[in-house]
Amino acid sequence: MKFLDETKVYIRSGDGGAGAVSFRREKFVEFGGPDGGDGGRGGDVWIEAVNGLNTLIDFRFQQHFKAKIGTHGMGRNRTGANGESVTLKVPVGTQIFEEDNETLIIDMIKEGQKFRVAKGGNGGFGNTHFKSPTNQAPNWANPGLEGEEKTVWLRLKLIADAGLVGLPNAGKSTFLASVTRARPKIANYPFTTLHPNLGVAAIDGREFVLADIPGLIEGAHEGVGLGDRFLGHVERTRVLLHLVSSLEEYVGKSYKTVKAELEAYGGGLTDKQEIVALSQIDILDEKELKKKAKELEKACGQTPFLISAITGKGMTEVLRALRDVIIEASEGDETALPDRSAPLQEFDEDDEQ
C-alpha cells in the first residue's frame, strides 16, 4: 500500500433548486391562483473521520468532489427534492486546511467525527410563497442560492501512543517488526524507511500503537536527507522512544544530533516524555557496551535501556516502560485514542513511492 499524508482536493456543494412559477388551472374552479413549489436544497460536502484508514491514498486519483444540485420546484405546490450530499472519508488524525495550507479549519481527532466543510445552497421560493391579499397572482419566483466552492488541503498526522525516533539505521524498523505484526523494510543502508509505519505492540495484556518514522540526520529541519516532514506523525504521541545504535562511534553525539533536530522542528516534541535506549547491543562486547552506555547516559541525562531486537534482550523492559508512561498520560485524558478493535493497515515499503 502506498502512503500519502498530504493532498489537495477541490470541493463544491450543490446549488439550490429554483422555485417554480405556476398557476392552478382546474375545471369548475372560478379562481385559480399561484401553486408554484419551492426548490430543494443543494447537497452538502462533509468530511468524516473513520477507523481502519491510515493513509490518504484514496485521494490520489480523485481530487474533485461535487454534491448534487437541488431539484427545481414544480406546480401543484410540489417542493423539489434536496440534492445528495457527498462525504469524504478520512483517517482519524486528519487536519483540514484552507487553500493557503496554513489556516486550520478542523482537526479530525475522533472516530465518527463529522464536519460540514461546504454548505449546499438553499432552494428558491416558488410564487406561492409571495401570494398576499394585495398580490394574489405573483408571477415570479426565486432562483436557488449557489453552493460553496473551495479548495482545501488534507494533512494526516497519524495517531499513535508512542513514536520511534533516531538516526537512520538506529534499528527502529527492526524494533517495530520484533514487537508488532508490522513488516517494514529492513536493510543495512541509510533511509531504508521512506515513510511512516504503524504497528500494535502488546505487553502484559495492554496494547498500544507504535509509529516508526524515517531517520533524522543533521540538518533535517533544513531539508537535508528526507527532511523533517514526517515528524508530524509523532506529534500526537504520548511518549518518544529514542533509539541510538551501538554501531555509532560516538553515541552521545548521535543522541544530541537527533535531539537538536527535534528542537528545531518544534511542535512540542521536546516537551514529551522520552525514553532512551541503546540498540543493537548484541554486536558489542561487555567492555565496549559499558563504555557506550555510560557515554549515552551522560548525554541524555538518564539511564538508557540496553536492548537487542535480534536476541530480545531488554525488549520486555522497554515495552513496559512505554506502557507505564502511556497509561499515566492517558489517565483523565478525554481525547480517546483510536479504537483498537479494528486492525490497522500495515504499509509495505516495497510499494512504489
Image (cartoon, rainbow, N blue to C red):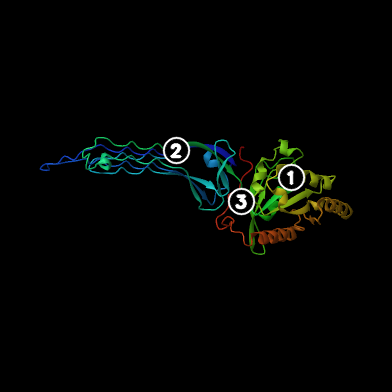
- In the rendered structure, the answer to whether residue 108 lies left or right of residue 274 reads left
Q: x and y percent of residue 226 in the render?
A: 70, 38
Q: Residue furthest left?
A: 28
* Residue in the foreground of this view, choosing between 92 and 106: 106
| Amino acid type of the residue that numbered disc 2 sits on in the rendered structure | Glu
For discs 1 and 3, the disc positioned in front in the rendered view: 1
| Image location (x, y in percent) of residue 7 | 56, 38
Horizontal side of 270 relative to 110 (left or right) equals right
Q: Report the residue marked by disc 3.
A: 159
Check disc 1 and give the amino acid type.
Glu
Amino acid under disc 3 = Ile
Viewer-nearest residue: 88 or 191: 88
Q: Is residue 201 left or right of residue 289?
A: left
Do the numbered discs 3 and 2 sit on residues whose CB atoms are within 8 Å? no
Sequence-wise first label, 3 or 2 = 2
How far, Cα to Cα, is label 3 from label 2? Answer: 31 Å
Q: Quadrant of residue 76?
A: top left
Q: Element under label 1?
A: helix
Structural crowding at the residue carrying mark 1, measured as other residues with C-alpha within 10 Å and reported as few (<14), some (14–19) or many (≥20):
some
- Quickly name the residue at label 1: 263
The reply to whether residue 181 is in sight is no
Q: Earlier in the sequence, mark 1 or mark 3?
A: 3
State whether residue 192 is above or below residue 50: above
- Return the x and y of residue 240 as percentages of the image width and height: 71, 52
Q: Residues within 10 Å of mark 2 (few under 14, many from 20)?
A: some
- Taking the spot 72% from the left edge, 39% from the top edge, the residue there is 221
In the displayed structure image, the side of residue 129 where residue 328 appears, left or right = right
Residue 297, numbered circle: none
Which mark lies nearer to you, 3 or 2?
A: 2
Q: Which residue is mark 2?
A: 148
For the C terminus, which image quadrant? top right
